[in-house]
Image (cartoon, coloured by chain):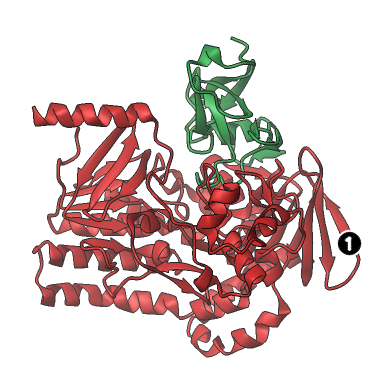
Amino acid sequence: MSEPASPDLIVVGAGPAGMAAATTAAEAGASVLLLDDQAKPGGQIYRAVEAADAASEAVLGPEYMAGRPLAAALRSSTVTYVPDAAVWQVSDGREVGYSAAGRAHLVRARQVILATGAQERPFPIPGWQLPGVMMAGAAQTLLKSSGLAAEGAVFAGSGPLLYLVVHQYLQAGVQVAALLDTTSSANRLPALAHLPGALRRWDMLGKGRRWMAAIKASGTRVVSGVSALKVLGDERASGLGYRVGTGPWREIQSEHVFVHQGVVPNVNLSFAAGIKHRWDERQLCWHPLTDAWGRTDLDGIAIAGDGAGIGGALAAEAAGRIAALGALRELGRIDAAACDAQARPHRVALEREGRLRPFLDTWFRPADHFRVPVDDTTLVCRCEELTVKDLTDVMEIGLAGPNQLKSYCRAGMGPCQGRFCGLTVQELMAREQGRTPEAVGYYRLRPPIKPVPFSELAMLDADDTANDG
Amino acid sequence: MFKRITPESAAQSVAFDFEGRTIAAWPGDTVAAALLAAGETQFRTTPEKNRPRGPFCMMGVCFDCLMVIDGEPNRQACQVLATEGMRVRRQNGAAEIGPDDAIPGDGA
């Protein structure tokens, strides 16, 4: 093994938070192991950024290029960077289990920083499981990694990423059939309360408005006030049906449907580690409980970036550096005064990036009926193929929570381990039982959080024996 | 269908087998990206109801793009980089545990 046997710090995830945390710690002399499930550094936001050129900047925008110096700093650092590594466990004793190149490893570190980022929020509408339907982030991934775009696609949903991807398609000269906007007008008034703070980031607000103006100027069909969606097609998507307000159903034909309604922290690893979480009513998702240094209730384990709550790429980078400084202090590599002083500019950046967030969260809050489907036939658990009716029938028995639901119908027990049904099941149960989502709670997640072959685990024992000998 | 927006660099492309069809993959393509570029949309059928599925999240969290790659079932096509000579096929129904040639429907 090329990695240090027992590094000072293990960082999980090579997005903005993870790259910043790993390089900051390594620059101060700490031995750092950085594990990431992708082949190249960047995370989702800066995916394939090392291969970016002027042409990709023209399509993807200058914000994307901000990942280049982060990746370059990582490459020239002393960080032991392991790509294509699937982390399946972090124990409360800071032992990290991962698989890479067909082998499983268990490595214990003195400090651990989880930077697992975000995933797109589930968007359970009728037919969302059909081939041809993808998340808008998936469309962007294909654009970034492979220069692929789908001509004549229909985009539906709400949130900055949705408009950004449509804008990027248009910049690439790819025609978009329609943008169906589900942003609820009921959000406007509550969002206005957050406008004073948001106006301090007028530059960001202006950017969003420019994207929308460019989309409209392109002649792309934009439909606002969309109140219902259903994917058309039987074996694969053939289009998208929609309603505006209480109006009639209309249809747009397309073999590509991209949906999006925001992003949520990727909490499978932090939950499985046993870290305490709280329900965030504004972001409608779980946040691990962290302090000003990203530290959790588990000794030596911190969380930085969108995995601790959605803040965006620049906030994640700042949080990554702050968490690394906190870890360096714990490691005795810097004293408290130096730690505070070095963290200060990053705290300023973090505060600055956070100003727009309450407005965005409120303005783009997904409507209740798009988070919890009203149609009985809509699939909730994609893996185990369970519909709203399948679940509510079981809930009628009077279940204590989502974990009991598992034993009745296997909801959340398929390969995705609840990543695309957990929030829906939780809120569906809250609706059916008249409880708050927080009171209902989330699936109890256990390691391994990613599938790992038994053969690899068996070899792990052999490794240990060899090491002991 | 998906199309490339960047000029092709054919010299660097690799070829792999998808159920008898030769698929050209560009540098940086995952198996899923290369198949989507070739117009393929159905990557598997579900174990319970035998329904068609394809890539959905493209970032390794939805597990809907599970395929049999080089004989190994349950591989996430959106996470595996395409390499020369790879053998890829749909994972229809539940994954079978055992050697590749024991899986029904394998043409080999």
Please indicate, yes or no, whether residue B34 appears anywhere in the rendered image.
yes
Q: Which residue is mark 1?
A: A249
Question: Residue at the top extreme?
Answer: B108
Q: Nearer the viewer, residue B60 or A409?
A: A409
Q: Quadrant of the C terminus of chain A?
A: top left
Chain of the residue under label 1: A
Name which quarter of the figure residue A168 lies in. Answer: bottom right
Amino acid type, mark 1: Trp
Q: Nearer the viewer, residue B50 or A224?
A: B50
- Residue B34, percent across and down? 58, 32
Instruction: State the residue at coordinates (58%, 64%).
Output: A262
Is A316 displayed left or right of A167 in the figure?
Answer: left
Q: Quadrant of the N terminus of chain A?
A: top left
Name which quarter of the figure residue A271 lies in. Answer: bottom left
Give the answer, above or below, for where B48 lies relative to A265: above
Q: Nearer the viewer, residue A14 or A236?
A: A236
Q: In the rendered image, what is the letter of the chain coloured red?
A: A
Q: In the rendered image, what is the letter of the chain coloured green?
A: B
Instruction: State the residue at coordinates (69%, 46%).
Output: A129
- Residue B48, percent across and down? 66, 36
- Residue A120, percent across and down? 55, 57
Question: Residue at the right extreme?
Answer: A248
Is A150 displayed left or right of A110 in the figure?
Answer: right
Q: Nearer the viewer, residue B61 or A251?
A: B61
Local secondary structure at mark 1: loop
- Residue A336, percent across and down? 12, 75
Is A14 displayed left or right of A147 in the figure?
Answer: left
Please indicate, yes or no, whether residue A223 appears anywhere in the rendered image.
no
Instruction: State the residue at coordinates (52%, 34%).
Output: B29
Mark 1 Cα within 10 Å, few/some/many (few <14, many 20+)? Answer: few
Give the answer, above or below, for where A168 lies relative to B103: below
Instruction: State the residue at coordinates (72%, 79%).
Output: A185
